[in-house]
Image: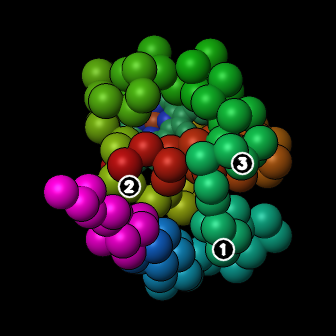
Amino acid sequence: MKVQSTPKTMTLLVSIMVLSLALFGCGTTPTPKASVSDPSASSQTPGDPAVARGLSLFNTQCSVCHGKNGSGGSGPRLIDKTPLASYVQANMPRNKPGSLTSEQVSDVIAYITSLK
Ligand code: HEC
């Protein structure tokens, strides 16, 4: 008997990537303020160093309200969200808004958008 290889799996992976790119591309047309470094404009891969930096930032500054892995807590669940940089920059962390550099905002958004 012949073992079937599954090109379907590859097709699925590719579709997911294309879909995410499309989402990042269209889902965020931020206010001019955010255009300086709109991280959602670039593609994010799991090995992206920005995602790793965003993860550690998230764990220290966001997870207290948004839960481990953005699963939600006193703050809303962030999984499947594509936050606007301008929003995060101006409003988060809720207890210390405006404290993040634009690079930190961009990293943490890279992390949040990787939470699917
Ligand atoms: C002290 C608690 C707290 C902390 C810390 C915090 N948040 Fe929030 N966050 C909230 C609350 C509460 C909301 C709901 C909106 C509001 O009340 O302003 C929110 C909303 C959000 C939203 C919008 C969610 C939506 O449904 O559209 C994003 C994105 C977000 N936070 C990101 C972050 C990031 C990134 C950090 C870390 C840098 C962070 N938050 C830290 C409490 C917090």
Q: Quadrant of residue 39?
A: bottom right
Q: Secondary structure at mark 3?
A: loop
At horizontal 70% and vertical 79% (from top left) the residue drawn is 32
Q: How is the image coloured?
A: rainbow
Quadrant of the image for the N terminus? bottom left
Frontmost residue, 93 versus 24: 24
Q: Is mark 2 within 8 Å of ligand 1?
A: yes
Q: Are marks 3 and 1 in contact (CB under 8 Å)?
A: no
Does the magenta-highlighted stretch encompass residue 29? no
Upstream in sequence: badge 2 or badge 3: 3
Number of residues whose C-alpha sits closer than 10 Å to that of mark 1, classed few (under 14), some (14–19) or many (20 or more): some
Upstream in sequence: badge 1 or badge 2: 1
Q: Which residues are magenta?
A: 1-13
At horizontal 81% and vertical 70% (from top left) the residue drawn is 36
Number of residues whose C-alpha sits closer than 10 Å to that of mark 3, classed few (under 14), some (14–19) or many (20 or more): some
For disc 1, the marked residue is 41
Residue 38 horizontal side relative to residue 90, left or right: right
The amino acid beneath tag 2 is Lys
Q: Are marks 2 and 3 in contact (CB under 8 Å)?
A: no
The amino acid beneath tag 1 is Ala
Does residue 98 sit above or below 28 in this rendering?
above
Upstream in sequence: badge 3 or badge 1: 1
For disc 2, the marked residue is 81
